């Protein structure tokens, strides 16, 4: 986890073809230039292999942050609002026509997501903000990968990673929430999945669920112990066994239940459209199940700390059921044969994905939580069979008594940056035609441009004209 969103790409758009300004004539061209850079960066990012995209996210984020103030300035001018107390006269020549590639729409196997065309500046702003929120989520994903690297991070490093990741999730949540209010005012949003209020509301709830789980992960020692135990390069076990400090188990269980509630809300909202990518729906469902399983585990830890080991084992059995795995007690015998082979193969495949840094974590931490529960089950069953000999109650009545969740984060409003006074003053100068980029092309092909004008039978890439512009024929 988190979910590996795919960043959308877009066609060319020249704002000077749709708008003109008497007070700031350079504004449409300056916005077009920044958009052309963003278009190129998104297309380059799409062509990168999955393992190399994380290092490119900072470039995409910087390009979005550079383009967004110009885009919002165009919107403010068209709506008659002032920017830094300065009035901008911007006239609309014709309706802005923009095209983006949707990445949330369900598609068939091997087929690329379709392009969608929209009218108006609202569609452009919605897609840019949606892309910005996805970049923050992907940066959080890249940060969390360091927790499962070849070198086990220290407690301070782990805290720093989780803190930085939480900031990315909360920023994504605020952006998605701002898109919810914006979608309510956009008439064209009814046909484009990314601009639907229920879509952005579901993504906002998903980001908040992830941030809530991180508040638990920061002080949860058990996933780190399991990851260290499975790390082939870690040699700390030769020196001393890992320390497992006492945790605020009951509080952490309430936080996990709050994350499960947010994930359940996200699942309901994202599924309502009927056109959402199945991989995203499956991930949100797994996140809800994982959050409830974590809550069961912490209730079990709380019971074990109180001397009720049998009750704690029952909670772990309930956590297994929440994950969709039946425990050995329910099966009547230990896992063996083909089922054990399939489980071991799944674990090895997930570990390989983490090593490569590619499409890992698609199960929302479900397999990782199962490993933690298995570790505690093995330990507590051994203690209960040799020392405590307590009876193990049924797990279903315990799970039914779980309380409501407790939130730790609150959504904050998104405050985008705006153009400063010096930049606005420079926009009063006439536009320089030399600054006009090639973003005015009509091609919307996101896979790259082919060589134009090649002669039949000629070497690929050779021009059909000579250096002085005369045709060979």
Image: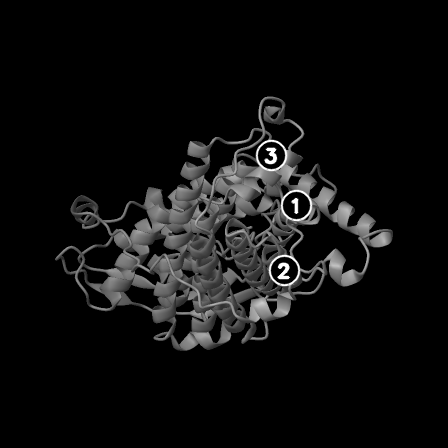
**Circle 1 Cα neighbour tier, 10 Å, few/some/many (<14 / 14–19 / ≥20):** few
Local secondary structure at mark 2:
helix
Q: Earlier in the sequence, mark 2 or mark 3?
A: 3
- Count all numbered tags in the image, as a single digit: 3
Nearest to the eye among marks 1 and 2: give it: 1
Q: Decide which of tag 1 and tag 2 comes sooner along the chain.
A: 2
- Residue at image mark 3: 228
Q: Decide: is 96 above or below 424.
A: below
Give 267 or 274, whichever is nearer the viewer.
267
| Residue at the image point whose x is 57% and y is 36% from the top | 466
Q: Nearer the viewer, residue 298 or 172?
A: 298
Image quadrant in which you'd find residue 51: top right
Q: Locate residue 75 relative to residue 35 in the image: left or right.
A: left
**Residue that appears at 65% across and 66% down:** 394
Give the residue at mark 2.
314
Q: As rendered, which of 431 and 202 lies closer to the eye?
A: 202
- Tag 3: Cα neighbours inside 10 Å, few (<14), some, or many (≥20)? many
Residue 144 x %, y %: 51, 42
Query: Mark 3 or mark 1, which is nearer to you?
Result: 1
What residue does disc 1 label? 387
- Disc 2 versus disc 3: distance between alpha carbons? 26 Å
Residue 76, image quadrant: bottom left
């Amino acid at each position: 986890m988190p979910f590996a969103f795919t960043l959308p790409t877009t066609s060319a758009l020249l704002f000077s073809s749709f708008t003109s300004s008497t007070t700031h004539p350079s504004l449409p061209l300056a916005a077009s230039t920044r958009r052309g850079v963003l278009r190129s960066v998104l297309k380059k990012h799409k062509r990168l292999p999955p393992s190399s995209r994380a290092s490119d996210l900072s470039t995409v984020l910087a390009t979005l942050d550079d383009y967004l103030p110009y885009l919002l300035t165009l919107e403010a001018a068209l709506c008659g609002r002032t920017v830094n107390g300065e009035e901008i006269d911007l006239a609309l020549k014709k309706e802005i026509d923009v095209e983006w590639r949707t990445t949330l729409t369900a598609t068939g196997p091997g087929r690329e997501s379709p392009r969608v065309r929209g009218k108006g500046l609202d569609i452009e702003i919605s897609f840019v903000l949606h892309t910005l929120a996805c970049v923050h989520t992907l940066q959080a994903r890249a940060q969390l990968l360091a927790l499962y690297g070849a070198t086990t991070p220290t407690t301070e490093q782990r805290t720093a990673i989780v803190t930085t990741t939480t900031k990315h999730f909360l920023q994504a949540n605020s952006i998605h929430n701002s898109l919810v209010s914006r979608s309510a005012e956009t008439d064209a949003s009814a046909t484009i999945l990314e601009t639907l209020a229920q879509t952005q509301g579901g993504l906002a709830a998903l980001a908040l669920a992830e941030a809530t789980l991180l508040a638990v992960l920061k002080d949860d020692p058990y996933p780190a112990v399991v990851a260290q135990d499975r790390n082939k390069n870690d040699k700390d076990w030769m020196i001393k066994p890992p320390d497992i400090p006492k945790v605020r188990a009951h509080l952490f269980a309430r936080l996990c239940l709050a994350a499960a509630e947010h994930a359940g809300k996200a699942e309901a909202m994202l599924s309502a459209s009927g056109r959402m990518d199945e991989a995203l729906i499956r991930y949100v469902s797994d996140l809800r199940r994982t959050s409830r399983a974590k809550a069961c585990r912490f209730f079990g830890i709380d019971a074990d700390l109180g001397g009720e080991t049998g009750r704690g084992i029952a909670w772990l059995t309930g956590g297994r059921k929440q994950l969709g795995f039946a425990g050995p007690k329910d099966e009547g015998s230990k896992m063996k044969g083909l089922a054990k082979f399939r489980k071991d193969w799944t674990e090895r495949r997930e570990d390989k994905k983490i090593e490569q840094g590619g499409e890992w974590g698609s199960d929302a931490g479900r397999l990782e939580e199962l490993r933690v529960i298995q570790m505690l089950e093995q330990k507590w069953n051994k203690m209960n069979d040799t020392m405590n000999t307590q009876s193990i109650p049924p797990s279903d009545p315990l799970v039914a008594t779980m309380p409501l969740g407790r939130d730790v984060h609150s959504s904050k409003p998104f405050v985008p940056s705006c153009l400063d006074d010096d930049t606005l003053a420079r926009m009063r100068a006439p536009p320089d035609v030399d600054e006009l980029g090639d973003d005015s092309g009509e091609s919307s092909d996101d896979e790259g441009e082919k060589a134009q004008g090649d002669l039949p039978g000629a070497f690929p890439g050779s021009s059909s004209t000579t250096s002085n512009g005369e045709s060979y024929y």
